[in-house]
């Protein structure tokens, strides 16, 4: 009985030890992978711009960016302040905003240097990073350093309680420079060979040149081209036309005697041809032709998105199109600084420090037009790549499994040892009881024999007396 009580007490001790080990493991896991409650503060509001340095008179584009982490939110409000001496608000737009419900339109006051906003969206709300709430366009007024700051704000969780989950407000520092003085270098004269008409013949086809469109095979965004040509000494008249026929004829009606021409109205995009004809006393000469390719439309960025490659490496996938001159190249800017001048998709971004970043994709066509699109990326300070995190989790799980296996093995051997001890104790007790039983039977036999002997003796004594 005592051994059974001791075994039960040992079992309780082992159970407590196992519980303490499991509690310690859970504490370690919780320390490495903290579990945040749904209403913990994890949302942030940030002011971002594609660059930090602007020139007096330049427009300053600033976006209010919302990041919520893993929390679903359905409303946010904020008050933004700025130095009205150095900046003035041109417009506040909610185009492309994540919010669809507005209690009132975003407002601003240039006299007070304040912008106010408040909006939301229906259930299930929004959860994610880099969402635009509003876009603000400032005008840089005075050189110097300035800041755009949040005076306050709220971000409400979509939990039915309106819990404020705002954890951080990030402002924006700007530098405004004075206007640069631009000096235009003197134009170099176009090299033209003197034109001589062969004796007794009509003029040769004029050799046409252009300052606005110097390369006939190239594309240009100037829609009012200008051309020049050299007149022979015996020229009497000039006829000029511009059309989209490569072999066009300007006719034989003289428009005067001149050696340059500019389009009177902007030409529509496409390929045009200038035609020039010169006459002398012998008649009208051959026609000179010059190709003029015009593209004033910027290229289209049809796709631009952030993606995550292996080990959560951040990259950009993009696609562009340009129906006329075609896309020439794409450059990538991070916070206004160029990181790639000839990028191809997908482009892997360089390592970025924690914080909010503006990734700008700029596409250029062969006429010099450009189009840009901003992407917003928030990197949390505690963010680590998934590969090390997964490896660490696997190691911890293996350690936990090993500890549980060791506990099971120890308990198994412990249980077998005590079961054997209990069985041996029971066998010993049975043997002792069996021995005692035999002794009792022997003693009982002796007592019976002794009693029978006494009875027999008394019987004989009685008989003798009779």
Image (spheres, rainbow, N blue to C red):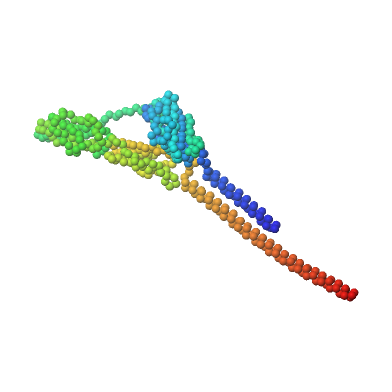
Q: Quadrant of the N terminus?
A: bottom right
Percent across and percent down for residue 13 are: 64, 52
Please indicate whether residue 318 sits to the left or right of residue 397 in the image: left
- Quarter holding the C terminus is bottom right
Q: Residue furthest top?
A: 111
Which x, y percent locates residue 235? 14, 30
In the image, residue 367 sits, relative to residue 403, either above or below, namely above
Residue for point 74% across, 66% down = 437
Left or right of 399: which side holds 372? Answer: left
Answer whether residue 211 is visible to the viewer in this image: no
Q: In the image, residue 240 lies at what x, y percent?
A: 17, 32
Q: Quadrant of residue 269?
A: top left
Q: Report which quarter residue 97 is drawn in.
A: top left
Q: Closest to the observer: 85 or 121?
A: 121
Quadrant of the rendered structure where residue 190 is? Answer: top left
Numbered disc total: 0
x then y, percent, for residue 3: 69, 58
Identify the residue shown where x is 32% and y is 36%.
370
> Position of 44 compared to 192: left or right?
right
Residue found at the very far front of the displayed protein = 466
| Residue beneath the point at 40% across and 27% down | 88
Camera-side residue: 313 or 115?
Answer: 115
Q: Is residue 89 among the parts visible in the rendering?
A: yes
């Amino acid at each position: 009985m005592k051994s059974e009580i001791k075994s039960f007490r040992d079992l309780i001790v082992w159970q407590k030890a196992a519980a303490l080990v499991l509690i310690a493991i859970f504490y370690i896991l919780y320390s490495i992978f903290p579990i945040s409650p749904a209403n913990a503060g994890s949302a942030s509001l940030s002011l971002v711009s594609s660059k930090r340095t602007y020139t007096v008179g330049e427009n300053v584009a600033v976006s209010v960016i919302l990041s919520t982490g893993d929390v679903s939110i359905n409303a946010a409000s904020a008050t933004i302040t700025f130095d009205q001496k150095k900046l003035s608000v041109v417009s506040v737009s909610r185009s492309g905003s994540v919010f669809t419900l507005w209690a009132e339109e975003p407002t601003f006051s240039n006299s007070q240097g304040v912008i106010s906003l408040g909006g939301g969206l229906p259930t299930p709300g929004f959860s994610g990073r880099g969402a635009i709430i509003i876009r603000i366009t400032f005008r840089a007024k005075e050189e110097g350093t300035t800041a755009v700051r949040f005076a306050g704000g709220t971000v409400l969780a979509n939990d039915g309680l309106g819990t404020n989950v705002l954890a951080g407000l990030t402002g924006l520092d700007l530098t405004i420079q004075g206007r640069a003085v631009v000096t235009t270098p003197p134009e170099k004269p176009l090299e033209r060979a003197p034109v001589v008409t062969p004796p007794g013949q009509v003029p040769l086809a004029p050799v046409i040149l252009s300052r606005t469109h110097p390369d006939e095979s190239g594309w240009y965004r100037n829609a009012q081209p200008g051309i020049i040509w050299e007149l022979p000494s015996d020229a009497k008249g000039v006829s000029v036309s511009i059309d989209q026929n490569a072999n066009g004829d300007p006719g034989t009606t003289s428009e005067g005697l001149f050696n340059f021409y500019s389009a009177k109205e902007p030409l529509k995009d496409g390929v045009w041809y200038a035609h020039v004809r010169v006459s002398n006393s012998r008649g009208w000469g051959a026609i000179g032709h010059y190709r003029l390719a015009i593209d004033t439309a910027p290229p289209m960025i049809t796709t631009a998105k952030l993606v995550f490659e292996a080990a959560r490496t951040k990259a950009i996938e993009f696609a562009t199109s340009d129906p006329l001159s075609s896309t020439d190249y794409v450059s990538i800017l991070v916070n206004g600084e160029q990181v790639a001048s000839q990028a191809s998709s997908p482009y892997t971004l360089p390592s970025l420090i924690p914080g909010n970043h503006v990734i700008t994709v700029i596409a250029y066509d062969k006429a010099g037009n450009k189009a840009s699109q901003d992407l917003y990326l928030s990197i949390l300070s505690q963010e680590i790549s998934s590969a090390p995190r997964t490896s660490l989790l696997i190691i911890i799980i293996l350690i936990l499994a090993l500890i549980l296996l060791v506990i099971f093995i120890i308990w198994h051997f412990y249980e077998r040892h005590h079961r054997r001890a209990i069985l041996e104790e029971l066998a010993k007790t049975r043997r002792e009881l069996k021995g005692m039983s035999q002794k009792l039977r022997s003693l009982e036999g002796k007592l019976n024999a002794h009693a029978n002997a006494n009875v027999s003796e008394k019987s004989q004594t009685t008989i003798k007396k009779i």
